[in-house]
């Protein structure tokens, strides 16, 4: 859909007057202000209606919440620690804490949502699961949940991402999942999502699509956000216990936006807490050289939602680039668009170069190798400290561990493994 037509067709913007008002979003139509909604083939409407009805019941169902909570505690390893970054704190003269989602089972925050949706699928009687993945962490998490719960699983992954994330491809196969390489387009996450949607249209009766981020058609942005809120809920309790004070800033990388919305959401009413999302600045300013939707995109319809998209003047989605496969995506979750419009969240961009520096900085100072995605949040730390008082409290969401990226970083830096 051309960009101009998409903008014209959208509902008028309705930005909440305060962060508190944002807590009630999305509205009944699945919109966050003018963003979100449901742009799908008619074939999928009944499945989305069924999913919404089931989720609205299960989000307050004590038995479902207990089953999920028990798994998050005993299988995933929650709560994840809030770790003081002692050396970084000294270097930047701020009290820097790391929310350790890298210590979740499977190595990232993705398992929180994958388990929640897999349990939901079982309640719906769906025995086949499909998913998409970029960096591979959502694919591994979905494969893990399906192995645990006895569900058949197929994951779509762009062949360029498969090259960059080969260890995760093998992990998925070890878990009994079929991994389907996608050769079309840029051979990355956008194209994997397209193939997953085609599969779902053809097999909607027995198949549930576990979307890995807070995007897509309603109710996915709301549902994924709710499954990931556990990150922020834990972080708030932990920082109050450790510091006796709310943080001055929270920083998280933003691809589709699930780890960021998960840690941000419980703090939306706390106006004194700066919320900072970090997009992939890539290697340049031109379209195709980055994945910073707010810096270089325009509003339009993309993969089931109305959101900010990297597209040309004719409304054609352009290629993207990021050193991180998990941030290499042309759209962004609709709630992030609303939070940007309301100025509740500030969105920065981090270049490939600064992200790679972020990996080394955290590894060399704290003995923690972050995922390339998470490294974008670390790579803008020099900018974040300017927005906080001396000795202020900063929480960085370390959304995943860097094992999956070591070979790609070595290749980029010319180191032969």
Image (cartoon, rainbow, N blue to C red):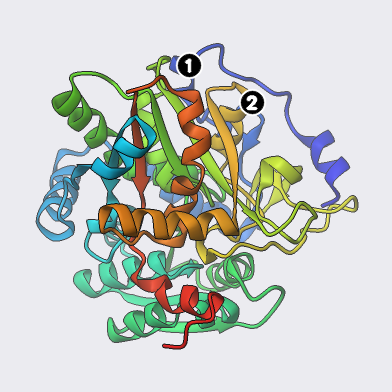
Please give the residue where the numbered disc 2 appears in the rendered image. 341
Please give the residue where the numbered disc 1 appears in the rendered image. 21
Image coordinates of residue 172 in percent, x first then y, are 35, 79
Residue drawn at x 39%, y 66% is 137
> Is label 2 in a helix, a strand or a loop?
helix
**In the rendered view, would you say 24 is above or below 288?**
above
Image coordinates of residue 109 in percent, x first then y, are 32, 54
Sequence order check, earlier mark of 1 and 2 = 1
Quick one: 338 or 121, which is closer to the camera?
338
Q: Which mark is residue 151?
A: none
Residue 155 quadrant: bottom left
Image coordinates of residue 23 in percent, x first then y, are 43, 23
**In the rendered view, would you say 236 is above or below 6?**
above
Q: Residue furthest right?
A: 314
Residue 57 quadrant: top left
Residue drawn at x 34%, y 44% is 228
Residue drawn at x 16%, y 49% is 78
Residue mark closest to the camera, 1 vs 2: 2
Q: Left or right: 156 with respect to 77?
A: right
The answer to the question of whether label 1 and label 2 lie on touching residues, with beta carbons closer than 8 A, is no
> Is label 1 in a helix, a strand or a loop?
helix
Q: Which quarter of the image is occupied by the C terminus?
A: bottom left
Image coordinates of residue 355 in percent, x first then y, are 51, 56
Residue drawn at x 30%, y 84% is 176
């Amino acid at each position: 859909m051309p960009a101009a037509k998409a903008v014209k067709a959208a509902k008028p913007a309705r930005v909440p007057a305060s962060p508190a008002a944002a807590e009630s979003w999305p509205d009944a139509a699945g919109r966050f202000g003018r963003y979100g909604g449901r742009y799908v083939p008619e074939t999928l409407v009944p499945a989305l209606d069924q999913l919404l009805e089931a989720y609205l019941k299960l989000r307050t169902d004590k038995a479902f919440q207990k089953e999920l909570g028990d798994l998050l505690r005993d299988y995933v390893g929650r709560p994840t620690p809030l770790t003081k970054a002692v050396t970084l704190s000294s270097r930047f003269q701020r009290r820097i804490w790391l929310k350790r989602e890298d210590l979740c089972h499977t190595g990232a925050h993705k398992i929180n949502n994958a388990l929640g949706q897999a349990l939901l699928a079982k309640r719906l009687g769906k025995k086949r699961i499909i998913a998409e993945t970029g960096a591979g962490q959502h694919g591994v998490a979905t494969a893990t949940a399906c192995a645990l719960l006895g569900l058949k699983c197929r994951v779509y992954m762009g062949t360029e991402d498969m090259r960059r994330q080969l260890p995760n491809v093998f992990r998925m196969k070890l878990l009994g999942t079929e991994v389907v390489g996608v050769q079309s387009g840029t051979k990355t996450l956008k194209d994997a999502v397209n193939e997953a949607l085609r599969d779902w249209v053809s097999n909607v009766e027995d198949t549930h699509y576990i979307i890995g981020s807070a995007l897509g058609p309603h109710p996915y942005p709301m549902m994924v956000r709710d499954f990931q809120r556990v990150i922020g809920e834990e972080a708030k309790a932990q920082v109050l216990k450790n510091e006796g004070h709310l943080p001055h800033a929270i920083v998280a990388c933003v691809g589709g936006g699930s780890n960021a919305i998960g840690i941000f959401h419980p703090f939306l009413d706390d106006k004194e807490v700066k919320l900072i999302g970090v997009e992939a600045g890539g290697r340049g300013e031109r379209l195709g050289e980055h994945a910073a939707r707010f810096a270089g995109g325009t509003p339009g319809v993309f993969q089931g939602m109305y959101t900010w998209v990297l597209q040309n003047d004719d409304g054609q989605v352009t290629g993207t680039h990021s050193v991180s496969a998990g941030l290499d995506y042309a759209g962004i979750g609709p709630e992030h668009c609303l939070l940007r419009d309301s100025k509740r969240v500030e969105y920065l961009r981090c270049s490939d170069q600064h992200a790679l520096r972020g990996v080394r900085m955290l590894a060399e100072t704290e003995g923690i190798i972050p995922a390339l995605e998470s490294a974008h949040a670390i790579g803008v730390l020099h900018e974040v400290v300017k927005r906080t008082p001396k000795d202020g409290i900063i929480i960085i969401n370390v959304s995943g561990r860097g094992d999956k990226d070591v070979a790609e970083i070595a290749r980029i830096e010319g180191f032969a493994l």
